[in-house]
Amino acid sequence: MNVSVSLWSYVSLINKEMSVSEVIRHMHKHGIQYVELLDTFLKTDEDRLEAKKTIDELGMKVASYSIGNNFVCPENIRLSQVEMVKQACQYAKMFNTKVIRVFCGDVCEGYDFEKAFDLIVKSFKECVKVAEKEDIYFCLENHGQLAGKSKQIEAVIKAVGSKHLKATTDTGNFMLVGEDPLEAVRYLKDYVGLVHFKDFALVSKEEAQYIGNNGTIFAKGTVIGKGETPLKEIVDFLASINYEGCISIEYEGVIRLDYIEESIKNTLAFLK
């Protein structure tokens, strides 16, 4: 297993206090060799080229080129999202990674679960044709109401029917839908292509950073190892099934530059 850090860990700092290249250098300073890139921070060819230049200069690697697609939308928008996901295959190749983190989308007005599910499967079936040709793997994250649970992820993957659609198991997100993260990772063991290493603490409604899908789960991000996610047990299980992909740290606690320093150190120490 390789350790990565997601750019999302620096979300409130990027393009305000730090550039993407400065964030990548900060990771490298702390011994990180893999970075998870997010398209939301790399909007232009210039942005992508600058990131690649820094990564190549430091001898780092890219764990995933992660994108924020949404297939649950009117047809003209859905088609543009499909094209965006297909194009991401070329960006992944540019960064020498075979992994693209993807989403399904989310329930919205005018779309019931069945209609949304059909759109998601239809869209991924179109996208995987390019992934198969380019030897790229889409890794579907458990996120939101349509793909928050392990069985929902499995249902989409099975319906699409391609080995080029795998799972991104986000350890914290499972808690938001009332699933035990360890049991969810175990359930998806045959599909895991990327792991988001996230820790949440369950808190009062007043303290909540996130509210779960059923409106009764209240959580906030913590330094990895300080929350209630069974991370050690998850790593033990991944080792037992010989998982050889990346564990990508997605820190969602307090984000200040001075605090990130200590958080990254403590997170890495815990993970190692």
Image: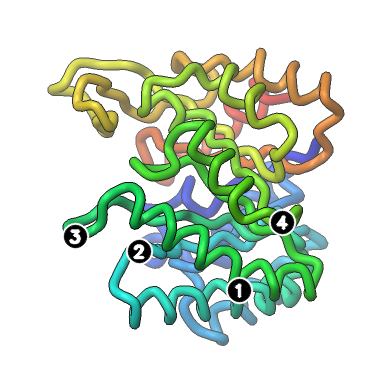
Quarter of the view holding residue 225: top right
Q: What amino acid type is highlighted by mark number 4?
A: Ser
C-beta proximity under 8 Å, tags 2 and 1: no
Q: Counting other residues with Cα less than 10 Å from the Cα at mark 2, is it few (<14), some (14-19), or many (20 or more)?
A: few
Q: Nearer the viewer, mark 2 or mark 3?
A: 3
- Between residues 209 and 272, which one lies in front from this camera angle? 209
Classify mark 2: helix, strand or loop.
loop
Residue 110 is labelled as 3
How far apart are the two marked residues, 2 and 3, measured between alpha carbons?
A: 37 Å
The residue that label 2 is drawn on is 16
**In terms of sequence position, does the residue under pointer 2 or pointer 1 come before the other?**
2
**In terms of sequence position, does the residue under pointer 4 or pointer 3 come before the other?**
3
Q: Percent position (x, y) of residue 17?
A: 39, 60
Q: Percent position (x, y) of residue 86?
A: 60, 76
Q: Residue at x 82, y 62 (%)?
A: 59
Classify mark 3: helix, strand or loop.
loop
Q: Is residue 16 left or right of residue 32?
A: left
Q: Is residue 212 above or below residue 256?
A: above
